[in-house]
Image (cartoon, rainbow, N blue to C red):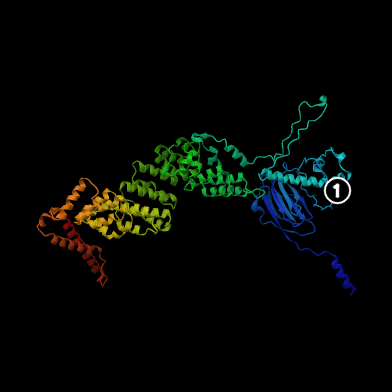
C-alpha cells in the first residue's frame, strides 16, 4: 500500500503532458519583404537554425503543429519558395537565393519572421539567439521632471538592431543634477526602453510612409555653439531634416498637388494630360490574368488600408485588357482621388458601351490637344456631339490604343466621325484598326461593309463581305444583320431569307432584352421587304408586352409603308381587312397613317379611313381635310363641313361645294358615286345595291371559316378551298365595280 501511495504522489509531482495545439501561420506581402507570423498564444521557447537550403523553425519542449494551408494565398513564391514540415520536427522554410530572415517577438506571443534580401537586411544572420521578453519587477524611482527622459535617454541611431545591448551614445549633459537612485534605475532600464523605442519608431515610420498618420517633428533648436573663434569650422555642419518616413509624401498627395498645375485651355477648363489615358503603357507584361492577380494581392497594405498606387495600377490593367466594369468597380470601391475616378469611369463606360455621367468633366474635353479628345468624343451621345473636336488628337490617340480596346471602340468612333462630318477620319479608323491586326477581325469587316454601303455597295455585296461575321455567334454578327437589313431598306431590295431566319431565332432566345427586340424588328422589316407581309405581321404579334410604343410604331410604320408601295388595290384591301384589328390597336406614325387613309378614301372606304385617323388624333390641317374627304365618301355633307369650318384654301373650297350639294340634293351624279350608265337610278336604290355588295364582301373576307366537316380526301379539301377563293374574288370584283 505504501508503494501505491508513493507512485501516486510521484505522478502528481511531474507536470502534466500538454496536448499539442495547432498554431496558425499567416502571411503578408510587402514591397521590401515577405512576412510570416506564427500566432502563438504566449511567447514560446523557439529557435530557428539554418539546415542546408532550409531554415528550421522549432519550439522546444513541445511537438507543435502548424496550419500552413493559407500561407501562399496572400504572398507569391518570390522570396519564400516553400513552407513545409521538416523531417526532424518543426517547420522548414526554403528561401530564394540571396535572402535572409529577420525575427522579432510580439509581447502577446506571436513570432514574426521577415524575409528580405541580404544587402537590405541589417543583420544577415537569423536571430536564432533572440530571447523572449522577461517581465522585470517594478522599480520605485523618484518621479522625474517632464524633460528628464529626453535629457537622459538620447536619440536612437539604429532602429533595426533588436539585440539586448545598446550602442546608442548617451549625452552626459545634465547628469550632475539627477539623483543617484533615478540614474541607477534608468541605467538598468535603458536597454529595454531603447528596444521599445526602436520598435515604436519603426512602426510609426511604416504608418507615416503609408499616409496613415501625420505629425510634425519637434522644431530644431537654434542654439549657437560657443566656441573660440580660432576653432570655428569653416563650413557649419548641415542640419539633417526630419525622419524621411515621417516627412514622406504619399502618391495621393503628389497627384493632388500635380493636378493643380494641369494645363488650361479656353474657358479655364482643364485638359487632362495624356498620362491619364495612356492605355498602351498600361498593358501588363506576360500573362494578363497573372498580372491582374498580382495587382489584386497588393491592394491592401500592412495596416489593411488601400494602397492608392496598387489600386490605380489594377484599374489601369483592367482598362488596357478591355474590362471596363471591373476597372470602374475598383476605383469606386476604394474611393480614389477625383481625377482617377473621372478618367477611369469615362473610359470604362465607353468600353462597355454605356452612358457616361453628365457631370464627368471628360465630356467637355473634345477640343483638347491630348488623348482626352478621343474619350470626350466617344463619351458624347450621338444626338448631341460636341461642336469643337480636335480630329488630329482623336486620330493620334486612337492609333495609340491597344488592339483589344481599338477593336471595341472602332464602330462607335467611325459612326460619330461620320455624323460630325469627317468621313475621311472615319476611313482612317479602319486603316488604324487593320494595321494592328494580323487578320481582319469582325469589327474591321463591319467597318469595310459600312464604307461599301455608303459608296456603291448593295445588299448582296454586303452579305458576301460579312459572311464570316454572320457565321459566328458574336455581338458583331448582330450588328452585321442590322447593317444588311438597313441597307436593303434604304435601297428597297430583298434580304437573304437565311439571315432573317437567324435573326428570328436569336430574337426568341434574347427577348425581352433590347437586343432581342432589335432582332425581332429586323426580322419583321426584312420579311416585309421580301413581300411576306403575313410573316411580318405574325412577327409583330410576337412582340412581348408591355411594349415600347416608339419601337412598335416605327416597325409597324415601316411594314405599312412597304405594303402601300408594293400591293395593288385588291391585295391592299385584303391586307387591311385581314389585319385591321392589329393596325388599329397599335400606334402609327403620321406619314403611314395618313397614306393608308388616303388609299382607303380613294377606294371608297371612308368609315375605315376615319377609323385609321382616329388611332391618333393628330391635330393639323392635313388630318382635318382627310376626315372631311372621308365624310364625303360616306355622303355625310354636314360632317364634312364641320371638319373644314375653321380652315381655308382652294382644296377646302372644293370640299365645301361638294358638301353643300349633298345637303341640297344638287350634287352631280359622279360626285355621289353614280356613273353615266346608272345616273337615272334613284339614290336609295343605288345605296341598297352598294350596301348589298359591301355586305357580300365583308361576308367573304371577314367571316370565320365554316366548321370542319367530313371531307372526301384531298380532292374534297381542295375543292372547298377553290370555292371559297372564288366567292372572295366575286365579292371583291363586284365591290370594285361599284366603286368605279
Q: Nearer the viewer, residue 645 or 108?
A: 645
Asked if residue 324 is positioned above or below residue 169 in the image, the reply reads below
Res 116 quadrant in image: top right
- The answer to whether one can see residue 672 in this image is no
User: Where does the image place residue 626, in percent across and percent down from the top left?
Assistant: 24, 51
- Outermost residue toward the top in this view: 230
Left or right position of 543 against 403: left
Residue 623 pos. (x, y %): 27, 51
- Helix, strand or loop at disc 1? loop
Give the side of residue 652 with respect to residue 192, left or right: left
In the orientation shown, which residue stands out farthest toward the bottom?
1
Front in this rendered view, residue 500 or 218: 218
Which residue occupies the extreme right position in the image? 2
**What residue lies at 61% left-to-right and 45% top-to-bottom?**
308
Check the picture and name the quadrant holding the N terminus.
Answer: bottom right
Which residue occupies the foreground of this view, 497 or 171? 171
* Corner quadrant of residue 721: bottom left
Residue furthest to the front in view is 646
Quarter of the image with the C terminus is bottom left
Which x, y percent locates residue 496? Answer: 34, 52
Q: How crowded is mark 1: few (under 14 residues within 10 Å), some or many (20 or more)?
A: few
The reply to whether residue 731 is visible in this rendering is: yes
- Measured from the top left, where is residue 521 in percent x and y? 37, 53
Q: How many marks?
A: 1
Q: In this view, does 452 lie to the left or right of 90?
A: left
Residue under numbered circle 1 = 141
Amino acid at each position: 500500500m505504501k508503494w501505491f501511495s508513493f507512485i501516486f504522489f510521484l505522478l502528481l509531482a511531474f507536470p502534466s503532458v500538454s496536448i499539442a495545439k495547432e498554431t496558425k501561420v499567416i502571411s503578408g506581402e510587402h514591397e521590401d519583404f515577405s512576412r510570416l507570423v506564427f500566432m502563438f498564444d504566449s511567447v514560446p521557447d523557439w529557435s530557428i537554425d539554418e539546415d542546408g537550403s532550409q531554415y528550421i523553425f522549432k519550439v522546444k519542449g513541445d511537438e507543435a503543429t502548424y496550419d500552413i494551408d493559407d500561407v501562399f494565398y496572400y504572398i507569391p513564391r518570390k522570396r519564400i519558395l516553400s513552407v513545409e514540415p521538416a523531417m526532424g520536427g518543426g517547420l522548414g522554410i526554403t528561401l530564394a537565393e540571396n535572402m535572409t530572415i529577420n525575427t522579432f517577438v510580439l509581447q502577446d506571443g506571436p513570432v514574426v519572421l521577415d524575409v528580405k534580401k541580404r544587402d537590405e537586411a541589417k543583420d544577415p544572420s537569423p536571430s536564432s539567439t533572440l530571447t523572449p521578453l522577461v517581465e522585470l519587477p517594478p522599480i520605485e524611482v523618484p518621479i522625474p521632471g517632464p524633460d528628464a527622459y529626453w535629457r537622459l535617454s538620447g536619440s536612437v541611431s539604429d532602429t533595426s538592431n533588436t539585440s539586448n545591448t545598446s550602442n546608442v551614445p548617451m549625452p552626459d549633459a545634465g547628469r550632475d543634477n539627477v539623483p543617484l537612485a533615478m540614474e541607477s534605475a534608468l541605467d538598468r532600464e535603458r536597454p529595454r526602453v531603447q528596444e521599445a523605442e526602436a520598435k515604436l519608431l519603426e512602426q510609426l515610420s511604416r504608418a507615416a510612409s503609408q499616409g496613415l498618420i501625420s505629425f510634425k517633428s519637434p522644431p530644431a533648436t537654434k542654439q549657437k555653439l560657443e566656441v573660440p573663434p580660432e576653432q570655428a569650422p569653416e563650413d557649419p555642419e548641415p542640419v539633417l531634416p526630419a525622419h524621411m518616413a515621417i516627412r514622406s509624401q504619399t502618391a495621393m498627395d503628389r497627384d493632388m498637388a500635380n493636378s493643380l498645375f494641369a494645363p488650361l485651355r479656353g474657358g479655364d477648363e482643364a485638359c487632362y494630360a495624356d498620362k491619364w489615358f495612356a492605355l498602351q503603357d498600361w498593358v501588363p507584361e506576360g500573362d494578363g490574368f497573372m498580372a491582374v492577380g498580382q495587382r489584386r494581392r497588393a491592394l491592401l497594405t500592412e495596416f489593411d488600408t488601400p494602397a492608392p498606387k496598387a489600386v490605380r495600377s489594377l484599374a489601369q490593367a483592367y482598362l488596357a485588357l478591355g474590362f471596363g466594369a471591373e476597372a470602374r468597380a475598383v476605383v469606386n470601391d476604394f474611393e480614389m482621388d477625383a481625377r482617377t475616378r473621372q478618367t477611369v469611369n469615362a473610359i470604362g463606360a465607353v468600353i462597355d458601351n454605356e452612358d457616361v455621367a453628365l457631370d464627368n468633366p471628360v465630356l467637355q474635353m473634345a477640343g483638347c490637344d491630348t488623348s482626352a479628345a478621343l474619350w470626350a468624343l466617344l463619351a458624347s451621345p450621338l444626338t448631341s456631339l460636341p461642336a469643337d473636336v480636335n480630329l488630329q488628337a482623336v486620330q493620334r490617340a486612337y492609333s495609340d490604343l491597344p488592339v483589344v480596346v481599338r477593336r471595341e471602340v472602332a464602330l462607335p468612333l467611325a459612326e460619330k466621325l461620320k455624323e460630325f462630318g469627317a468621313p475621311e477620319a472615319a476611313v482612317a479608323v479602319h486603316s488604324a484598326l487593320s494595321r494592328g491586326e494580323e487578320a481582319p477581325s469582325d469589327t474591321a469587316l463591319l467597318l469595310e461593309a459600312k464604307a461599301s454601303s455608303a459608296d456603291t455597295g448593295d445588299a448582296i455585296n454586303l452579305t458576301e463581305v460579312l459572311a464570316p461575321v454572320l457565321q459566328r455567334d458574336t455581338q458583331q454578327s448582330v450588328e452585321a444583320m442590322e447593317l444588311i437589313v438597313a441597307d436593303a431598306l434604304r435601297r428597297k431590295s430583298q434580304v437573304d431569307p437565311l439571315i432573317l431566319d437567324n435573326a428570328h431565332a436569336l430574337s426568341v432566345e434574347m427577348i425581352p432584352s433590347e437586343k432581342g427586340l432589335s432582332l425581332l424588328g429586323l426580322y419583321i422589316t426584312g420579311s416585309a421587304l421580301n413581300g411576306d407581309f403575313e410573316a411580318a405581321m405574325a412577327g409583330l404579334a410576337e412582340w412581348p408586352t408591355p411594349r415600347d410604343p416608339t419601337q412598335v410604331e416605327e416597325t409597324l410604320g415601316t411594314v405599312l409603308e412597304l405594303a402601300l408601295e408594293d400591293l395593288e388595290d385588291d391585295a391592299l384591301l385584303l391586307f387591311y381587312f385581314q389585319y385591321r384589328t392589329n393596325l388599329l390597336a397599335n400606334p402609327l406614325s403620321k406619314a403611314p397613317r395618313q397614306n393608308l387613309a388616303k388609299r382607303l378614301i380613294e377606294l371608297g372606304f371612308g368609315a375605315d379611313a376615319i377609323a385609321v385617323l382616329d388611332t391618333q388624333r393628330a391635330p393639323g390641317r392635313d388630318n382635318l381635310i382627310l376626315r372631311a374627304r372621308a365624310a364625303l365618301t360616306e355622303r355625310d355633307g354636314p360632317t364634312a363641313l364641320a371638319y373644314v369650318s375653321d380652315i381655308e384654301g382652294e382644296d377646302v373650297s372644293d370640299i365645301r361645294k361638294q358638301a353643300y350639294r349633298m345637303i341640297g340634293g344638287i350634287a352631280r351624279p359622279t360626285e355621289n358615286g353614280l356613273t353615266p350608265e346608272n345616273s337615272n337610278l334613284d339614290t336609295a336604290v343605288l345605296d341598297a345595291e352598294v350596301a348589298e355588295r359591301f355586305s357580300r364582301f365583308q361576308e367573304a373576307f371577314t367571316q370565320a371559316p365554316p366548321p370542319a366537316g367530313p371531307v372526301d380526301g384531298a380532292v374534297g379539301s381542295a375543292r372547298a378551298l377553290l370555292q371559297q377563293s372564288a366567292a372572295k374574288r366575286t365579292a371583291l370584283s363586284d365591290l370594285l365595280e361599284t366603286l368605279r
